[in-house]
Image (cartoon, rainbow, N blue to C red):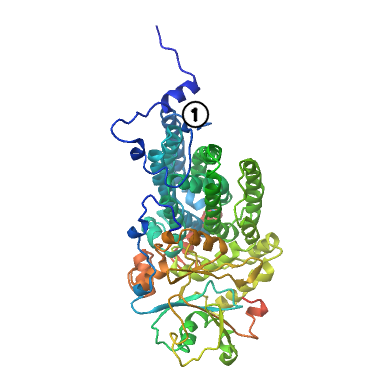
């Protein structure tokens, strides 16, 4: 244990408040639209592991929808990274099939869409 | 024969030394169980010197006098309807942030110093810590009393203790103090006494107090004056403690350096809330966050660490990253508040043209290029009747608990993501600084109560946004969302009209 504590069995008294089993069977995942930096942070979504990857697009529309670029996205040209690795997701397959777990991070780029007046906002 | 009056030095010696007894049936380590496990080595506790030489009886006398003056001013302020003299109704949101985000931390600080005042085995620092503990309790009381006058008129203040414990952005200051208070007594002293009170406090108090003065809030200014002499004592305690630890044993240096690194970064993240306040929330701005950072950290902090270099202590890790980020944090965090004020206990608004020009002038390298366009986009949406709110839950940094809004050092168009694995689970961070803190003590931080995680786990009043706001004790349509058109705004406009009518009459 890296931590210096007054009791050698410190961890016995602790409780991890972010374990996957606390999420009622859902995976908490994060989704982030790159080059649209005006949105405060990546979106957190609780999704069952069987959720088709394509459903993410609808799930994030509630946040990203008001942006003038949102309606212009050509999803067939989007570039994806899942947990830091380049990915070519299959929209019909589940998020679990894509190797995603609790707090996986999906980042996507939409080439040609550079935010409000090209400012990446 | 009359007794000779004691000199100040003798008095101090009598009232702060030789108060302890030698234990006979218990080892002394059992009386002071907390001051060794952190690995700090103290050879001679009596080497501690308190430059103020303040004794308890003198302390009570000084504080009582200050208290009388403060409450006389507060009474006069209330009787003269001082609330109508502030610069603009929007200013109230600064006080809401202060009351919900800072006053409860004064109380936490009081608890922390009370603990130190019991558990350090040297009597000198123990007495000084007890006095600071009482100061902090006095500060929270006087802040609540000062701001309570505004609570009679404006929304968003009445439920501040509950909000502090529950609302998502208030977990940022709360977790900072929870972290410090659950550390050992020496780390607490470095965290709060040194890093916060000495290195960073001017960045908190000067902006709030001069902001109050510029914006006609004379009651808060008076509170500030009343607290000022305490603050100088706290700063002295902070610097004395670090010098004492570094002088006592060379083995203390690496431990202290690690704490300085950690608490500098935690403090810098916490003060982002002040940056947002200074750059956007004062109707009459005082100075930019960047200017404040240059004066109070780059110059004053730089001189301090030059002075401490003879002990081998170095500038805190990532201080250059923090200095570079001074160009960005105010804009990034006000952007956060603007789009999340529908789930906050205070209002936000679109900066007007004059304010944006002030920001361009203060941030010539960054504002027009990176931040003005986002406000123009949102202003356009407002014009179309579609004021932008972020309608979702978001990713938090596992250490500082702020939303993961910050950008890569040197690249303000790319969001910064850092990640670590611990015992098969993934943890996310907004910066290298926050990642390092977690990696040094993962067993501690996995316990963190992260507000978004807790909503998903079902621990925050229910699954919908109104459920959560109700649990936060934020009154929807009253305490939250856009300032323009809010009850606060209407009240302020009605006061302005009254003034115009009485002037015309």
The residue that label 1 is drawn on is: B53
Q: Total label count? A: 1
Q: Locate residue B148, reporting x and y percent.
A: 41, 50
Asked if B306 appears above or below A45 in the picture, the reply is: above
Residue B141 seen in render: no
Residue B382 seen in render: yes
- The residue that appears at 50% across and 74% down in the rendered structure is B389
Q: B262 left or right of B32?
A: right
- The residue that appears at 43% across and 34% down in the rendered structure is B122
Q: B56 left or right of B198?
A: left
Q: Locate residue B169, reporting x and y percent.
A: 46, 63
Asked if B179 appears above or below A67 in the picture, the reply is: above
Q: Chain of mark 1?
A: B
Q: Locate residue B381, reporting x and y percent.
A: 56, 78
Q: Nearer the viewer, residue B149 or B30?
A: B30
Q: B456 left or right of B315?
A: left
Q: Locate residue B80, reporting x and y percent.
A: 47, 45
Q: B247 left or right of A112?
A: left
- The residue that appears at 60% across and 90% down in the rendered structure is A77
Asked if A69 appears above or below B247 in the picture, the reply is: below
Q: Residue furthest left?
A: B25
User: Regarding mark 1 in the picture, which secondary structure is present there?
Assistant: loop
Tell me where residue B171 sits by quadrant.
bottom left
Query: Which image quadrant: the N terminus of chain B?
Result: top left
Q: Residue furthest top?
A: B1
- Tell me if mark 1 has few (under 14), some (14-19) or many (20+) residues whose alpha carbon lies within 10 angstroms of its own: some
- The residue that appears at 41% across and 66% down in the rendered structure is B451
């Amino acid at each position: 244990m890296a931590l210096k504590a007054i009791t050698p069995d410190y961890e016995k008294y602790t409780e991890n408040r972010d374990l996957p089993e606390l999420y009622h069977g859902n995976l908490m995942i994060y989704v982030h639209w790159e080059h649209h930096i005006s949105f405060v942070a990546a979106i957190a979504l609780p999704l069952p592991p069987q959720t088709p990857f394509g459903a993410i697009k609808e799930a994030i529309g509630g946040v990203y929808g008001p942006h003038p670029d949102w309606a212009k996205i050509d999803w067939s040209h989007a570039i994806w990274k899942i947990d830091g690795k380049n990915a070519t997701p299959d929209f019909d397959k589940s998020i679990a099939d894509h190797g995603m777990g609790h707090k996986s991070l999906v980042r996507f780029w939409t080439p040609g869409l550079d935010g409000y007046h090209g400012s990446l906002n | 024969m009359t007794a000779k009056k004691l000199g100040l030095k003798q008095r101090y010696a009598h009232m702060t030394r030789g108060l302890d007894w030698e234990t006979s049936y218990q080892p002394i380590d059992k009386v002071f169980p907390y001051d060794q496990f952190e690995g700090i080595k103290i050879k001679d506790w009596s080497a501690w010197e308190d430059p103020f030489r303040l004794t308890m009886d003198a302390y009570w006398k000084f504080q009582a006098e200050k208290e009388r003056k403060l409450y006389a001013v507060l009474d006069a302020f209330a009787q003269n309807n001082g609330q109508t003299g502030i610069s603009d109704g929007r200013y109230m949101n600064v006080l809401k942030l202060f009351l919900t985000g800072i006053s409860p931390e004064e109380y936490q600080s009081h608890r922390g110093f009370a603990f130190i005042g019991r558990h350090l085995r040297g009597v000198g620092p123990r007495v000084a810590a007890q006095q600071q503990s009482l100061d902090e309790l006095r500060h929270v009381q006087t802040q609540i009393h000062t701001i309570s006058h505004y609570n009679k008129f404006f929304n968003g203040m009445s439920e501040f203790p509950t909000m502090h414990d529950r609302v998502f952005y208030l977990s940022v200051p709360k977790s900072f103090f929870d972290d410090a208070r659950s550390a050992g007594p020496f780390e607490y002293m470095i965290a709060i006494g040194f890093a916060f009170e000495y290195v960073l406090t001017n960045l908190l108090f000067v902006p709030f107090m001069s902001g109050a003065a510029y914006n006609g809030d004379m009651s808060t200014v008076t509170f500030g004056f009343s607290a000022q002499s305490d603050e100088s004592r706290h700063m002295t305690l902070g610097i004395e403690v670090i010098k004492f630890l570094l002088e006592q044993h060379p083995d203390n240096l690496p431990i202290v350096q690690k704490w300085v690194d950690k608490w500098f970064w935690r403090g810098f993240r916490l003060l982002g809330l002040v940056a947002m306040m200074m750059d956007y929330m004062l109707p009459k701005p005082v100075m930019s966050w960047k200017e404040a950072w240059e004066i109070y950290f780059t110059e004053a902090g730089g001189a301090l660490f030059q002075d401490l270099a003879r002990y081998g202590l170095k500038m805190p890790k990532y201080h250059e990253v923090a200095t570079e980020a001074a160009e960005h944090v105010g804009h990034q965090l006000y952007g956060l508040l603007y789009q999340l004020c529908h789930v906050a206990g205070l209002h936000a608004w679109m900066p007007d043209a004059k304010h944006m020009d002030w920001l361009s002038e203060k941030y010539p390298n960054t504002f027009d290029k990176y931040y003005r366009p986002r406000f123009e986009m949102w202003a356009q949406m407002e014009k179309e009747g579609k004021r932008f709110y972020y309608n979702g839950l978001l990713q938090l940094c596992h250490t500082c608990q702020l939303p993961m809004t910050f950008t890569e050092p040197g690249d303000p168009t790319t969001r910064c993501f850092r990640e670590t694995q611990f015992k098969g689970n993934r943890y996310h961070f907004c910066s290298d600084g926050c990642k390092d803190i977690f990696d040094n003590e993962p067993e501690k931080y996995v316990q963190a109560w992260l507000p978004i995680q807790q909503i998903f786990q079902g621990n925050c009043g229910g699954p919908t946004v109104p459920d959560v706001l109700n649990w936060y004790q934020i009154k929807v349509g009253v305490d939250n969302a856009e300032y323009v058109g809010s009850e606060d705004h209407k009240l302020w406009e009605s006061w302005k009209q009254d003034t115009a009518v009485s002037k015309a009459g």
